[in-house]
Protein backbone atom coordinates (compact mmCIF):
# COMPACT_ATOMS: atom_id res chain seq x y z
CA UNK A 1 0.00 0.00 0.00
CA UNK A 2 1.23 3.49 -0.62
CA UNK A 3 0.14 7.06 -0.30
CA UNK A 4 1.34 10.24 -1.94
CA UNK A 5 1.65 13.42 0.07
CA UNK A 6 -0.53 16.39 -0.60
CA UNK A 7 1.18 19.09 -2.60
CA UNK A 8 0.94 22.84 -2.48
CA UNK A 9 -2.27 24.43 -3.80
CA UNK A 10 -2.05 25.42 -7.44
CA UNK A 11 -2.49 29.12 -6.60
CA UNK A 12 0.41 29.07 -4.10
CA UNK A 13 2.68 27.27 -6.55
CA UNK A 14 1.89 29.78 -9.31
CA UNK A 15 2.54 32.70 -6.95
CA UNK A 16 5.91 31.27 -5.90
CA UNK A 17 6.90 30.68 -9.52
CA UNK A 18 6.02 34.24 -10.50
CA UNK A 19 7.86 35.61 -7.48
CA UNK A 20 11.00 33.61 -8.29
CA UNK A 21 11.01 34.77 -11.92
CA UNK A 22 10.46 38.40 -10.96
CA UNK A 23 13.27 38.56 -8.41
CA UNK A 24 15.63 36.68 -10.78
CA UNK A 25 14.85 39.16 -13.57
CA UNK A 26 15.49 42.14 -11.27
CA UNK A 27 18.81 40.58 -10.24
CA UNK A 28 19.80 40.11 -13.88
CA UNK A 29 19.00 43.72 -14.76
CA UNK A 30 20.93 45.03 -11.74
CA UNK A 31 23.94 42.88 -12.68
CA UNK A 32 23.86 44.31 -16.22
CA UNK A 33 23.96 47.92 -14.96
CA UNK A 34 26.69 47.33 -12.36
CA UNK A 35 28.92 45.44 -14.79
CA UNK A 36 28.81 48.32 -17.28
CA UNK A 37 29.47 50.97 -14.60
CA UNK A 38 32.38 49.07 -12.97
CA UNK A 39 33.99 48.38 -16.34
CA UNK A 40 33.88 52.08 -17.23
CA UNK A 41 35.20 53.15 -13.81
CA UNK A 42 38.02 50.58 -13.95
CA UNK A 43 39.15 51.74 -17.39
CA UNK A 44 39.08 55.39 -16.31
CA UNK A 45 41.05 54.81 -13.09
CA UNK A 46 43.22 51.87 -14.16
CA UNK A 47 42.37 50.15 -10.85
CA UNK A 48 42.86 46.38 -10.94
CA UNK A 49 40.54 46.06 -7.97
CA UNK A 50 37.73 47.87 -9.80
CA UNK A 51 38.40 45.97 -13.04
CA UNK A 52 38.41 42.68 -11.14
CA UNK A 53 35.16 43.72 -9.50
CA UNK A 54 33.79 44.50 -12.99
CA UNK A 55 34.83 41.04 -14.18
CA UNK A 56 33.20 39.61 -11.08
CA UNK A 57 30.00 41.51 -11.87
CA UNK A 58 30.16 40.23 -15.45
CA UNK A 59 30.17 36.71 -14.10
CA UNK A 60 27.37 37.78 -11.75
CA UNK A 61 25.42 38.75 -14.85
CA UNK A 62 26.06 35.35 -16.40
CA UNK A 63 25.03 33.66 -13.15
CA UNK A 64 21.91 35.81 -12.77
CA UNK A 65 20.93 35.04 -16.35
CA UNK A 66 21.46 31.34 -15.70
CA UNK A 67 19.38 31.60 -12.53
CA UNK A 68 16.58 33.40 -14.35
CA UNK A 69 16.25 30.69 -16.99
CA UNK A 70 16.76 27.84 -14.49
CA UNK A 71 13.84 28.92 -12.28
CA UNK A 72 11.63 29.12 -15.37
CA UNK A 73 12.54 25.54 -16.30
CA UNK A 74 12.47 24.14 -12.74
CA UNK A 75 8.86 25.25 -12.21
CA UNK A 76 7.62 23.10 -15.07
CA UNK A 77 5.46 20.21 -13.83
CA UNK A 78 6.61 16.59 -14.01
CA UNK A 79 6.24 14.89 -17.38
CA UNK A 80 6.90 11.47 -18.91
CA UNK A 81 10.64 12.14 -19.24
CA UNK A 82 11.04 13.82 -15.83
CA UNK A 83 8.77 11.99 -13.39
CA UNK A 84 10.32 13.82 -10.41
CA UNK A 85 9.92 17.24 -12.04
CA UNK A 86 12.60 19.67 -13.26
CA UNK A 87 13.78 20.93 -9.86
CA UNK A 88 17.39 19.80 -10.27
CA UNK A 89 17.87 22.37 -13.02
CA UNK A 90 18.25 24.87 -10.17
CA UNK A 91 20.95 22.72 -8.54
CA UNK A 92 22.79 22.52 -11.87
CA UNK A 93 22.50 26.31 -12.18
CA UNK A 94 24.00 26.73 -8.70
CA UNK A 95 26.84 24.36 -9.63
CA UNK A 96 27.74 26.25 -12.83
CA UNK A 97 27.48 29.61 -11.09
CA UNK A 98 29.93 28.40 -8.42
CA UNK A 99 32.27 27.38 -11.23
CA UNK A 100 32.04 30.87 -12.77
CA UNK A 101 32.89 32.41 -9.41
CA UNK A 102 35.95 30.17 -9.10
CA UNK A 103 37.17 31.09 -12.61
CA UNK A 104 36.77 34.81 -11.96
CA UNK A 105 38.73 34.55 -8.70
CA UNK A 106 41.54 32.62 -10.40
CA UNK A 107 41.84 35.29 -13.12
CA UNK A 108 41.89 38.14 -10.59
CA UNK A 109 44.61 36.46 -8.49
CA UNK A 110 46.74 35.83 -11.60
CA UNK A 111 46.44 39.43 -12.78
CA UNK A 112 47.20 40.86 -9.32
CA UNK A 113 50.31 38.70 -8.89
CA UNK A 114 51.56 39.74 -12.32
CA UNK A 115 51.17 43.44 -11.51
CA UNK A 116 52.97 43.09 -8.21
CA UNK A 117 55.79 40.97 -9.71
CA UNK A 118 56.36 43.14 -12.81
CA UNK A 119 55.76 46.41 -10.96
CA UNK A 120 53.63 47.65 -13.85
CA UNK A 121 50.96 49.22 -11.78
CA UNK A 122 49.73 52.77 -12.31
CA UNK A 123 46.59 54.15 -10.71
CA UNK A 124 44.83 57.25 -12.02
CA UNK A 125 42.96 59.32 -9.49
CA UNK A 126 39.20 59.74 -10.09
CA UNK A 127 36.08 60.07 -7.98
CA UNK A 128 34.08 57.81 -10.31
CA UNK A 129 35.46 54.49 -9.09
CA UNK A 130 34.54 55.40 -5.50
CA UNK A 131 31.00 56.36 -6.46
CA UNK A 132 30.56 53.23 -8.58
CA UNK A 133 31.84 50.94 -5.82
CA UNK A 134 29.60 52.60 -3.22
CA UNK A 135 26.63 52.22 -5.58
CA UNK A 136 27.58 48.57 -6.11
CA UNK A 137 27.57 47.94 -2.36
CA UNK A 138 24.09 49.44 -2.04
CA UNK A 139 22.69 47.50 -5.03
CA UNK A 140 24.25 44.19 -3.88
CA UNK A 141 22.83 44.69 -0.38
CA UNK A 142 19.35 45.30 -1.82
CA UNK A 143 19.29 42.35 -4.22
CA UNK A 144 20.95 39.87 -1.84
CA UNK A 145 18.24 40.57 0.74
CA UNK A 146 15.48 40.30 -1.88
CA UNK A 147 16.89 37.04 -3.24
CA UNK A 148 17.39 35.52 0.20
CA UNK A 149 13.84 36.38 1.25
CA UNK A 150 12.33 34.73 -1.85
CA UNK A 151 14.72 31.75 -1.60
CA UNK A 152 13.60 31.07 1.98
CA UNK A 153 9.94 31.35 0.99
CA UNK A 154 10.16 29.10 -2.09
CA UNK A 155 13.07 26.83 -1.12
CA UNK A 156 14.93 27.66 -4.35
CA UNK A 157 18.63 26.63 -4.24
CA UNK A 158 19.43 28.71 -7.34
CA UNK A 159 18.11 31.90 -5.73
CA UNK A 160 19.86 31.01 -2.46
CA UNK A 161 23.15 30.69 -4.36
CA UNK A 162 22.52 33.99 -6.10
CA UNK A 163 21.81 35.65 -2.74
CA UNK A 164 25.03 34.30 -1.29
CA UNK A 165 26.90 35.38 -4.40
CA UNK A 166 25.76 38.99 -4.11
CA UNK A 167 26.31 39.16 -0.35
CA UNK A 168 29.90 38.05 -0.96
CA UNK A 169 30.14 40.82 -3.59
CA UNK A 170 29.51 43.38 -0.83
CA UNK A 171 32.67 42.31 1.01
CA UNK A 172 34.54 42.19 -2.26
CA UNK A 173 33.50 45.75 -3.04
CA UNK A 174 34.44 46.90 0.47
CA UNK A 175 37.90 45.36 0.05
CA UNK A 176 38.27 46.94 -3.42
CA UNK A 177 37.29 50.35 -2.02
CA UNK A 178 39.72 49.97 0.88
CA UNK A 179 42.51 48.98 -1.51
CA UNK A 180 41.73 51.88 -3.80
CA UNK A 181 41.80 54.43 -0.99
CA UNK A 182 44.93 52.90 0.56
CA UNK A 183 46.75 53.10 -2.78
CA UNK A 184 45.83 56.75 -3.20
CA UNK A 185 46.95 57.43 0.38
CA UNK A 186 50.31 55.73 -0.33
CA UNK A 187 50.88 57.92 -3.37
CA UNK A 188 49.79 61.06 -1.54
CA UNK A 189 51.94 60.45 1.55
CA UNK A 190 54.74 58.69 -0.40
CA UNK A 191 54.35 55.34 1.37
CA UNK A 192 55.70 52.86 -1.20
CA UNK A 193 54.24 49.64 0.19
CA UNK A 194 50.70 51.08 0.13
CA UNK A 195 50.81 51.33 -3.65
CA UNK A 196 50.27 47.58 -3.74
CA UNK A 197 47.14 47.77 -1.58
CA UNK A 198 44.82 47.59 -4.62
CA UNK A 199 46.14 44.28 -6.07
CA UNK A 200 46.58 42.83 -2.56
CA UNK A 201 42.94 43.66 -1.78
CA UNK A 202 41.93 41.96 -5.02
CA UNK A 203 43.85 38.81 -4.00
CA UNK A 204 42.33 38.85 -0.51
CA UNK A 205 38.80 39.15 -1.85
CA UNK A 206 39.36 36.39 -4.39
CA UNK A 207 40.72 33.97 -1.77
CA UNK A 208 37.77 34.70 0.50
CA UNK A 209 35.29 34.05 -2.31
CA UNK A 210 37.13 30.86 -3.35
CA UNK A 211 36.84 29.47 0.17
CA UNK A 212 33.09 30.11 0.31
CA UNK A 213 32.65 28.86 -3.25
CA UNK A 214 34.27 25.53 -2.30
CA UNK A 215 31.69 25.05 0.45
CA UNK A 216 28.87 25.99 -1.90
CA UNK A 217 30.13 23.59 -4.58
CA UNK A 218 30.35 20.73 -2.11
CA UNK A 219 26.75 21.30 -0.99
CA UNK A 220 25.49 21.57 -4.58
CA UNK A 221 27.25 18.38 -5.66
CA UNK A 222 25.79 16.65 -2.60
CA UNK A 223 22.26 17.57 -3.71
CA UNK A 224 22.96 16.42 -7.28
CA UNK A 225 24.15 13.11 -5.81
CA UNK A 226 20.94 12.85 -3.71
CA UNK A 227 22.83 13.54 -0.50
CA UNK A 228 20.86 14.94 2.42
CA UNK A 229 21.85 15.66 6.03
CA UNK A 230 21.86 12.47 8.10
CA UNK A 231 19.84 14.18 10.82
CA UNK A 232 17.04 14.93 8.34
CA UNK A 233 16.61 11.25 7.49
CA UNK A 234 16.84 10.34 11.19
CA UNK A 235 14.10 12.83 12.06
CA UNK A 236 11.85 11.36 9.33
CA UNK A 237 12.36 7.85 10.75
CA UNK A 238 11.74 8.97 14.33
CA UNK A 239 8.51 10.77 13.42
CA UNK A 240 7.21 7.78 11.41
CA UNK A 241 7.99 5.34 14.25
CA UNK A 242 5.88 7.45 16.64
CA UNK A 243 2.73 6.61 14.65
CA UNK A 244 0.62 4.07 16.62
CA UNK A 245 0.57 0.76 14.76
CA UNK A 246 3.98 1.12 13.08
CA UNK A 247 6.25 -1.67 14.30
CA UNK A 248 9.37 -0.34 12.56
CA UNK A 249 10.66 1.72 9.63
CA UNK A 250 12.48 -0.90 7.58
CA UNK A 251 13.67 1.50 4.88
CA UNK A 252 13.73 5.28 4.49
CA UNK A 253 15.03 7.11 1.44
CA UNK A 254 14.92 10.87 1.07
CA UNK A 255 16.10 12.91 -1.90
CA UNK A 256 15.92 16.51 -2.99
CA UNK A 257 15.23 17.98 -6.41
CA UNK A 258 15.45 21.75 -6.45
CA UNK A 259 13.17 23.06 -3.69
CA UNK A 260 11.21 19.78 -3.50
CA UNK A 261 11.78 16.78 -1.23
CA UNK A 262 10.78 13.18 -2.00
CA UNK A 263 10.48 10.58 0.77
CA UNK A 264 10.09 6.83 0.20
CA UNK A 265 9.42 4.72 3.32
CA UNK A 266 8.74 1.03 4.00
CA UNK A 267 6.79 0.50 7.22
CA UNK A 268 6.36 -2.78 9.10
CA UNK A 269 2.82 -3.27 10.42
CA UNK A 270 1.12 -6.02 12.42
CA UNK A 271 0.09 -8.88 10.14
CA UNK A 272 -3.47 -8.71 11.46
CA UNK A 273 -3.94 -5.05 10.48
CA UNK A 274 -7.04 -4.64 8.32
CA UNK A 275 -6.91 -2.95 4.91
CA UNK A 276 -9.01 -0.04 6.17
CA UNK A 277 -6.77 0.51 9.20
CA UNK A 278 -3.69 0.27 6.99
CA UNK A 279 -4.98 3.20 4.95
CA UNK A 280 -5.50 5.28 8.10
CA UNK A 281 -2.04 4.37 9.35
CA UNK A 282 -0.43 5.36 6.05
CA UNK A 283 -2.14 8.75 6.18
CA UNK A 284 -0.91 9.31 9.73
CA UNK A 285 2.66 8.34 8.73
CA UNK A 286 2.52 10.76 5.78
CA UNK A 287 1.50 13.59 8.11
CA UNK A 288 4.37 12.63 10.44
CA UNK A 289 6.88 12.97 7.58
CA UNK A 290 5.39 16.40 6.77
CA UNK A 291 6.31 17.53 10.29
CA UNK A 292 9.96 17.26 9.20
CA UNK A 293 9.63 18.01 5.46
CA UNK A 294 6.54 20.15 4.82
CA UNK A 295 5.00 19.67 1.36
CA UNK A 296 7.28 16.70 0.62
CA UNK A 297 6.08 14.10 -1.87
CA UNK A 298 5.74 10.98 0.30
CA UNK A 299 5.32 7.38 -0.86
CA UNK A 300 4.80 4.72 1.82
CA UNK A 301 4.97 0.95 1.33
CA UNK A 302 3.66 -1.42 4.02
CA UNK A 303 4.77 -4.97 4.83
CA UNK A 304 3.10 -7.34 7.32
CA UNK A 305 5.19 -8.44 10.29
CA UNK A 306 4.49 -10.49 13.39
CA UNK A 307 4.19 -8.56 16.63
CA UNK A 308 6.47 -9.67 19.45
CA UNK A 309 3.44 -9.80 21.73
CA UNK A 310 1.36 -11.89 19.32
CA UNK A 311 0.75 -15.33 20.84
CA UNK A 312 1.66 -18.64 19.25
CA UNK A 313 -2.06 -19.45 19.08
CA UNK A 314 -2.74 -16.27 17.08
CA UNK A 315 0.09 -16.97 14.65
CA UNK A 316 -0.99 -20.57 14.04
CA UNK A 317 -4.58 -19.46 13.42
CA UNK A 318 -3.35 -16.70 11.11
CA UNK A 319 -1.52 -19.25 8.96
CA UNK A 320 -4.62 -21.47 8.85
CA UNK A 321 -6.79 -18.48 7.89
CA UNK A 322 -4.43 -17.60 5.02
CA UNK A 323 -4.81 -21.17 3.77
CA UNK A 324 -8.61 -20.99 4.19
CA UNK A 325 -8.94 -24.01 6.49
CA UNK A 326 -10.69 -24.15 9.89
CA UNK A 327 -8.72 -25.40 12.92
CA UNK A 328 -9.84 -26.31 16.42
CA UNK A 329 -8.64 -28.11 19.53
CA UNK A 330 -5.37 -26.18 19.25
CA UNK A 331 -2.99 -26.89 22.11
CA UNK A 332 0.65 -26.07 22.90
CA UNK A 333 2.78 -28.15 25.27
CA UNK A 334 6.30 -27.53 26.54
CA UNK A 335 8.58 -30.56 26.87
CA UNK A 336 12.09 -29.93 28.20
CA UNK A 337 12.05 -26.36 26.92
CA UNK A 338 10.73 -27.30 23.46
CA UNK A 339 7.26 -26.42 22.24
CA UNK A 340 4.97 -29.06 20.73
CA UNK A 341 1.75 -28.06 18.94
CA UNK A 342 -1.31 -30.21 18.31
CA UNK A 343 -4.29 -29.08 16.24
CA UNK A 344 -7.27 -30.44 14.34
CA UNK A 345 -7.73 -29.37 10.71
CA UNK A 346 -10.95 -29.87 8.73
CA UNK A 347 -10.54 -30.74 5.03
CA UNK A 348 -12.93 -31.67 2.25
CA UNK A 349 -14.30 -35.16 2.90
CA UNK A 350 -13.80 -36.09 -0.78
CA UNK A 351 -10.08 -35.19 -0.76
CA UNK A 352 -7.75 -38.24 -1.23
CA UNK A 353 -5.51 -39.03 1.72
CA UNK A 354 -2.30 -38.32 -0.23
CA UNK A 355 -3.55 -34.86 -1.23
CA UNK A 356 -4.77 -34.12 2.30
CA UNK A 357 -1.44 -35.21 3.78
CA UNK A 358 0.51 -33.08 1.29
CA UNK A 359 -1.61 -30.03 2.11
CA UNK A 360 -1.20 -30.51 5.86
CA UNK A 361 2.58 -30.96 5.49
CA UNK A 362 2.78 -27.62 3.68
CA UNK A 363 0.61 -26.03 6.37
CA UNK A 364 2.90 -27.34 9.11
CA UNK A 365 6.00 -26.07 7.29
CA UNK A 366 4.46 -22.59 6.97
CA UNK A 367 3.56 -22.55 10.67
CA UNK A 368 7.15 -23.52 11.55
CA UNK A 369 8.49 -20.66 9.40
CA UNK A 370 6.14 -18.13 10.99
CA UNK A 371 6.80 -19.42 14.53
CA UNK A 372 10.38 -20.73 14.72
CA UNK A 373 10.10 -21.37 18.47
CA UNK A 374 7.85 -24.38 17.73
CA UNK A 375 9.85 -27.62 17.71
CA UNK A 376 7.20 -30.05 16.41
CA UNK A 377 3.60 -30.16 15.16
CA UNK A 378 1.04 -32.97 15.16
CA UNK A 379 -2.01 -32.36 12.99
CA UNK A 380 -5.19 -34.40 13.23
CA UNK A 381 -7.01 -34.40 9.89
CA UNK A 382 -10.79 -34.34 10.01
CA UNK A 383 -13.29 -34.42 7.17
CA UNK A 384 -15.47 -31.41 6.51
CA UNK A 385 -18.80 -32.38 4.88
CA UNK A 386 -18.88 -31.31 1.24
CA UNK A 387 -22.66 -31.74 0.87
CA UNK A 388 -25.61 -30.21 2.62
CA UNK A 389 -27.08 -32.75 5.03
CA UNK A 390 -30.78 -33.63 4.82
CA UNK A 391 -31.57 -35.14 8.23
CA UNK A 392 -34.53 -37.45 8.66
CA UNK A 393 -37.06 -36.85 11.40
CA UNK A 394 -36.88 -39.44 14.19
CA UNK A 395 -39.88 -41.49 15.14
CA UNK A 396 -41.67 -40.80 18.42
CA UNK A 397 -40.18 -43.86 20.08
CA UNK A 398 -36.67 -42.30 19.78
CA UNK A 399 -37.57 -39.20 21.80
CA UNK A 400 -35.74 -40.83 24.65
CA UNK A 401 -32.56 -39.22 23.26
CA UNK A 402 -33.90 -35.78 24.11
CA UNK A 403 -34.95 -36.98 27.57
CA UNK A 404 -31.50 -38.48 28.15
CA UNK A 405 -29.88 -35.12 27.34
CA UNK A 406 -32.12 -33.25 29.75
CA UNK A 407 -31.42 -35.84 32.43
CA UNK A 408 -27.62 -35.47 31.93
CA UNK A 409 -27.92 -31.66 32.13
CA UNK A 410 -29.95 -31.80 35.35
CA UNK A 411 -27.06 -33.41 37.22
CA UNK A 412 -24.87 -30.26 36.84
CA UNK A 413 -25.88 -27.30 39.02
CA UNK A 414 -24.06 -24.82 36.73
CA UNK A 415 -26.30 -25.69 33.77
CA UNK A 416 -29.41 -23.50 33.87
CA UNK A 417 -31.20 -25.37 31.08
CA UNK A 418 -30.91 -26.91 27.64
CA UNK A 419 -33.28 -25.90 24.83
CA UNK A 420 -33.74 -25.85 21.07
CA UNK A 421 -32.87 -29.54 21.01
CA UNK A 422 -32.78 -31.01 17.51
CA UNK A 423 -32.28 -34.70 16.76
CA UNK A 424 -31.77 -35.93 13.21
CA UNK A 425 -30.57 -38.91 11.21
CA UNK A 426 -28.18 -38.96 8.21
CA UNK A 427 -28.08 -42.50 6.92
CA UNK A 428 -26.96 -44.67 9.81
CA UNK A 429 -25.70 -41.70 11.85
CA UNK A 430 -27.73 -39.89 14.50
CA UNK A 431 -26.86 -36.29 15.35
CA UNK A 432 -28.00 -33.96 18.15
CA UNK A 433 -27.67 -30.21 18.63
CA UNK A 434 -28.86 -27.92 21.40
CA UNK A 435 -28.38 -24.60 23.21
CA UNK A 436 -27.07 -24.71 26.77
CA UNK A 437 -27.68 -21.78 29.16
CA UNK A 438 -24.86 -21.06 31.64
CA UNK A 439 -24.08 -18.29 34.20
CA UNK A 440 -22.82 -14.98 32.71
CA UNK A 441 -19.61 -14.86 34.77
CA UNK A 442 -18.42 -18.38 33.91
CA UNK A 443 -14.96 -18.38 32.24
CA UNK A 444 -14.58 -19.94 28.80
CA UNK A 445 -12.26 -22.56 30.27
CA UNK A 446 -14.95 -23.64 32.72
CA UNK A 447 -17.63 -23.46 29.99
CA UNK A 448 -15.62 -25.92 27.93
CA UNK A 449 -15.28 -28.28 30.90
CA UNK A 450 -19.02 -28.18 31.66
CA UNK A 451 -20.02 -28.81 28.04
CA UNK A 452 -17.48 -31.64 27.64
CA UNK A 453 -18.75 -33.31 30.83
CA UNK A 454 -22.35 -32.97 29.64
CA UNK A 455 -21.48 -34.58 26.31
CA UNK A 456 -19.64 -37.45 28.05
CA UNK A 457 -22.58 -38.18 30.42
CA UNK A 458 -25.06 -38.05 27.54
CA UNK A 459 -23.06 -40.47 25.36
CA UNK A 460 -22.92 -42.95 28.21
CA UNK A 461 -26.72 -43.05 28.01
CA UNK A 462 -26.97 -42.82 24.20
CA UNK A 463 -23.82 -44.27 22.62
CA UNK A 464 -25.63 -44.59 19.26
CA UNK A 465 -25.49 -40.79 18.78
CA UNK A 466 -22.67 -40.08 16.33
CA UNK A 467 -22.31 -36.30 16.66
CA UNK A 468 -23.22 -33.89 19.46
CA UNK A 469 -23.09 -30.08 19.01
CA UNK A 470 -23.72 -27.90 22.08
CA UNK A 471 -23.93 -24.12 21.79
CA UNK A 472 -23.32 -22.26 25.11
CA UNK A 473 -25.06 -18.97 25.82
CA UNK A 474 -25.24 -16.68 28.89
CA UNK A 475 -28.32 -16.31 31.06
CA UNK A 476 -28.60 -12.61 30.19
CA UNK A 477 -28.77 -13.32 26.47
CA UNK A 478 -31.31 -16.09 26.97
CA UNK A 479 -33.70 -13.91 28.97
CA UNK A 480 -33.86 -10.94 26.53
Image (cartoon, grey):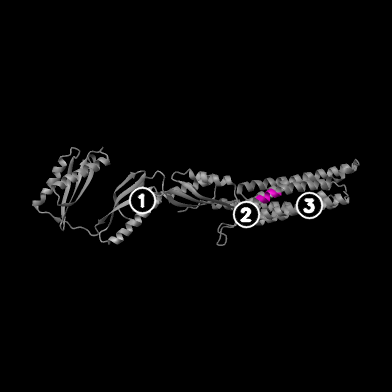
Name the residue tied to disc 2.
Answer: 224
**Position of residue 365 in the picture relative to residue 457 (left or right):** right
Name the residue tied to disc 3.
Answer: 54
Q: Inspect the magenta stretch and tell me whether residue 254 lies in it.
A: no
Q: Residue 396 location, x and y as percent? A: 9, 52
Q: Quadrant of the C terminus?
A: top left
Q: Inspect the magenta stretch and tell me whether residue 214 lies in it.
A: yes
**Position of residue 58 in the picture relative to residue 184 (left or right):** left
Q: Circles 2 and 1: CB distance less than 8 Å?
A: no
Q: Which residues are magenta?
A: 213-218
Lower sequence index among marks 3 and 1 = 3
* Quarter of the view holding residue 175: top right
In this rendering, does residue 139 appear at all?
no
Q: Which residue shows up at 83% across the image and 48% down it?
A: 199
Label 3: how many Cα within 10 Å (few below 14, some 14–19, many 20+): many
Name the residue tied to disc 1.
Answer: 318
Q: Residue 294 location, x and y as percent? A: 55, 47
Amino acid sequence: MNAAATTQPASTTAENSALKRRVALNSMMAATCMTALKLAAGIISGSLGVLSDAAHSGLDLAGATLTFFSVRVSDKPADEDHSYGHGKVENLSAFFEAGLMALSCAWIIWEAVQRIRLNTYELRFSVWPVLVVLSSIAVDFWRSRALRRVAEKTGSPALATDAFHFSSDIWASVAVLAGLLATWAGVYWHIDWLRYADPVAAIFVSLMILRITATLTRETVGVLMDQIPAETRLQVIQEAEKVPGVLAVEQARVRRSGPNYFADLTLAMPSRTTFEHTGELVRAATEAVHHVLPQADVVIHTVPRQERAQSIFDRVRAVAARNNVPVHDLSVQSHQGKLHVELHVELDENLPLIAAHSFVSGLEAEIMRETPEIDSILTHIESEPATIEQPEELVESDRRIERALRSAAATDSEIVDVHQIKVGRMGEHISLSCHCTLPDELSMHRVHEVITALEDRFKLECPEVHRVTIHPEPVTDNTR
